[in-house]
Image (cartoon, grey):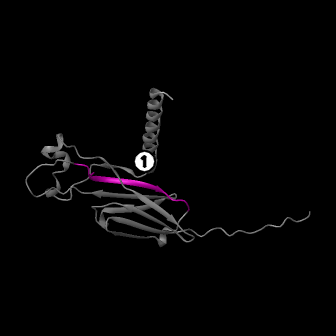
Amino acid sequence: MNRMAEFKHGLEEAWQSVADGWRQLRDRAAGALTHFGPGKPASAADARAPESAPESAQFPAATWALLAGDVFEDDDKLVVRVEAPGLEKDDFDLEVRSDVLVVRGEKRYEREATEGRYRVRQCAYGSFHRAIPLPSPVETDGAKATYRNGVLRIELPKAARAKTRRIEIGSG
């Protein structure tokens, strides 16, 4: 193989590796990518949101962020875990609709009390909602949710399964 063919082959392999990595990242993050819209200020002190801060022209606030999650299933229940740091348990609203868990919330902006300006702004603030498809029907009456160390954990008991029964075929 001549030098140019080796170079071309190496470049094709590198490009394929980057493309595969990007595809995997996109596929894994697709469901977790969540839009944060304008929220409502909790008080006059919070009224100065990131969008109205003087440095917002230089460092605009992020409007998309990852709310990564896992769905675990066993014979009796589904457990959904969503990583949502920087919130309080009262910031969430949970609902199950047609085998989809809807997680709504709001991450409020808290301005630093010191003088200065932002050099990096990657955090998203505002209201959000995330729809997580559930692999089986659940009983919402027995659902439990906890929020600790930035992780929202929702335990959903599975709906009673229809019993399987063999049907004999009669003659005539």
- Residue lying at the far front in this picture: please name it: 2
Q: Horizontal placement of 49 versus 156: left or right?
A: left
Residue 156: horizontal and vertical position, in percent? 48, 68
Q: Quadrant of residue 59?
A: top left
| Callout 1 secondary element | helix
95 or 128, which is in the foreground?
A: 128
User: Which residue type carries mark 1?
Assistant: Leu
- Residue lying at the far right in this picture: please name it: 172
Q: What segment is highlighted magenta in the picture?
A: 121-136
Residue 148, compared with residue 32, is above or below; it is: below
User: Which residue is rendered at x = 30% and y = 53% of the image?
Assistant: 127
State the quadrant of the C terminus.
bottom right
Q: How many marks?
A: 1
Q: Quadrant of residue 60?
A: top left
Pointer 1: what residue?
Answer: 25
Q: Horizontal placement of 62 versus 80: left or right?
A: left
User: Was residue 28 drawn as part of the magenta stretch in this picture?
Assistant: no
Residue 100, compared with residue 76, is above or below; it is: above
Q: Horizontal placement of 86 versus 133: left or right?
A: left
Residue 154, compared with residue 30, is above or below; it is: below
62 or 172, which is in the foreground?
A: 62
Crowding at mark 1 (Cα within 10 Å: few <14, some 14-19, many 20+): few
Residue 79, compared with residue 18, is above or below; it is: below
User: Which residue is rendered at x = 14% and y = 44% of the image?
Assistant: 55
Residue 153: horizontal and vertical position, in percent? 40, 67
Residue 67: horizontal and vertical position, in percent? 37, 55
69 or 156, which is in the foreground?
A: 69
User: Which residue is rendered at x = 9% and y = 57% of the image?
Assistant: 114
